[in-house]
Amino acid sequence: MKAGALVGWVLVVALSGHAQTQTGTIAQPSAPLAGDAQKGKTLFLAHQCFACHGYNGETGTRLLHDDGTFATRLLTVRGFIAFIRAPRPNERPPVGSSVTMPSYGVSSLPDEQAANLFAYIKTFKPTEPALNDIPLLTMMIREGSKSRR
Amino acid sequence: MAKSKDAVGRRRFLKRAAAGAAGATSLVAGIPGLGVDDAAAPAVVPSRKTGLGAAIPAPTAKQLARDAGAVAPPSVPPRTVVRPGSDLIVDALRSVGIRFVMANPGSSFEGMQESIINYGMTDIEFITALHEESAVAAAHGYAKAEGRPMATLLHGVIGVQHAAMAIYNAYVDRVPILMIAGLDYDGPVAAHNAIDMAALVRGFTKWDAQPRSLSEAIADVQRAYQIAVTPPTAPVLLTLTADIQKEETADQNLTVPLFRPSPILAADYLATKQVAAALVNATNPRINVGRLRTPAGVKLAVELVDLVGAQAGSSATTGPMSFPMSHPLRGHGVAGVPVDFTLSLDVVTNAPRVDDPGVNQRASANKGLVSASIQGPALLTTNFNVNTRRSGSNSPNALDIEADAEASLSGIIEEIQKQLTADKRRMIAERAKKNEAAHNEQRATEWAEAVEQARRGWNGSPIGLGRLHAELWPLIKDEDVCCSAPTGFTGGHATRLFPMDRPYSYLGSQGAGGMGYGAPASVGAGLAAKKAGDGRIVVNVQCDGDLNYAPGVLWTMAHHRLPVLTIMHNNRAWHQELMFMQFMAGVRNRGTDRMSIGTTLKNPEIDYAKMAQAYGMYAEGPITDPKDLGAAYKRALERVKRGEPALVDVITQPR
């Protein structure tokens, strides 16, 4: 890696406030970050990311918006990696049971794998039609809120 | 040649059959009551025909005469009990209104079981359970749907231990159940007995007793019922010896007294007057209706809210016996108008909050009473953490009344009617109109949000939980529905989308969070629906992990023809635990790629439609295409409306 690129990366990460991993080390980009979506799919299933985000990022804690855009942590691969390294950079992790986002250190999910995962998630496309295009739901809106005694 | 071989074979067969018959006769000889003279038993004759060296006696003349039908029946009849003690126990169960007794058979209560089947059959039905935990959990569901208990029988210490988890759930949930454990000192397995049977579950039963006589047992059944239904309502356990069940009472002058239920503690006169006055004089009163004891309590709560035109909070989306969600006065009232008096009603002390976040709780300049709560008493302190939160206030403007809310309502209503003037009535009518308009607006917003939630992942496969519920909506929107299973793991869509207007619309959670509750609780809800006989159906959105604790309840549903529609939320995992494990692995920086171990139900996948079919139930699935849901539901509902259960297996998104 060229010195200028390294400085740039450190600056970006430092400004984002996401540089610190849970173990206190600085995550270093160690591989090209053009991810392989097919490998990412394998990782998505193996790590069971769908547990919280659904199989298409549309259910549970949503990754994908109606208009096909993604949650802010999925805007760039660097941002994504910084996020998974420390989902709550300014908080101590909960002591008790939690269903919040797990953290992934470099040893448990290297940058290359994270980039693959990122590439796969970015292939998601919305499956949800607009409400007005779903006859059942429009009927529900029309009829459903009537009060009864 | 072939014919000759066959003939030889037949001869051998006949010889062996004759030898076997002779051997059987030797077993019969000496059995009292068969008209065979033991003393005249013949000498044993060795036989070589059997090839086994066994001793074969020759038949006696008496035996031959008996076999020919030439012997009169014995002069001493076999032991016959004309009026067994258990018949009177059944009468005692009748006296308190028990309609169902659910059990997995066990010799320690064979007397009771026989009495229920042959003596109590006209008005008490024996429901067959495949596990004691299922029996108690079904009684849990029944009590929440009905507001009154059913009974279960438990076989000795093994039955009590099997039932323990379900008893704990019911105890924490403040649900009344009348449990009877059989105890047979002469039973086949000594280890089924205990000196103190109830000790196993005493920490989480409200009361137990082991009567020493039949007359005590009769009194204890009525006492047990009374204690179970008196707040704090909870399970009770009666240990009944086999001797009491089997004793002959024909020569005794024992009868079951008329059951006179004791009054349940209501708010005292002074408190009643204070609450009534506060409601009459408030400019904008609010009544938070939590869980009440019975449907009669819900009716009274509606009457009270209507009487004073108050805005009403409801916990109908967290459990049974609360205020109807689509009642025109349910909601947070007119925006910006502060509430100046709040009355909270609840059967339990650690009830979930029913406060509506939209309520403007700021008190007005009212210097008098600004809040009152009528809540049932706490359970006795035990080894278990069951009284976790005691609501209340130290404010001099707050009144905390430890009494039964339902029992207090009639007095409050009566007192209000005395205090209302024509002016007050006019003011109340105007307020009610405004609250109704606010309700309509709020409900439209809530409904739009509920529908939007249902849209999430609409065309996804696996199928989203929103669509799983929404496809059912047009089929049940006008039906009388009881949602029986907890919604904590199914996204809460059922309580947002389905009608929540009856006391039993939603039965709430497990109580203590013990899994293996939803499916058997649906059996209890099904029994309540069957008893109602008015077309009520039960919708059970069933988590796969929960069903696998005791899937035999599917057979019980089929056998007893219960109108239960089970829709499988088949995400092939204990998903909450999976997420916990993922987080834990993250904390330890070890990666989450092995967290499926011990948290998922894959390899092999379970086919719930086949499982249900094997138990004798109509079933379809697994369904993976959301477009197939509506038609499958329709077919299944047709069965349910005919009074039988059905199951639709749906492969779902995790959450």
Image (cartoon, coloured by chain):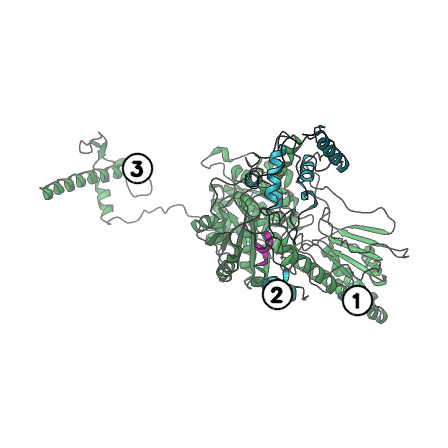
Q: Does the stretch in magenta take in B463?
A: yes
Question: Which one is nearer the viewer's eye here, B196 or B492?
Answer: B492
Which amino acid does the dot numbered 3 rest on? Gly
Mark 2–mark 3 Cα distance, whole angstroms, equals 80 Å
Residue A137 as seen in the image, left or right of residue B310:
left
Q: Label 3 is found on which chain of the structure? A: B
Q: Label 1 is found on which chain of the structure? A: B
The residue beneath circle 3 is B30
Residue B122 as seen in the image, left or right of residue A20:
left
Is there CB contact under 8 Å for labels 1 and 3?
A: no
Q: Does the stretch in magenta take in B145?
A: no
Picture layout, residue B81 above or below residue B162: below
Rendered colour, chain B? green
The residue range painted magenta reads: B456-470
Question: Which one is nearer the viewer's eye here, B556 or A87?
Answer: A87
Residue B186 as seen in the image, left or right of residue A63:
left
The residue beneath circle 2 is A139
Sequence order check: which comes first, mark 1 or mark 3? 3
Give me the chain that's cyan: A
The disc label shown at residue B434, or none: 1
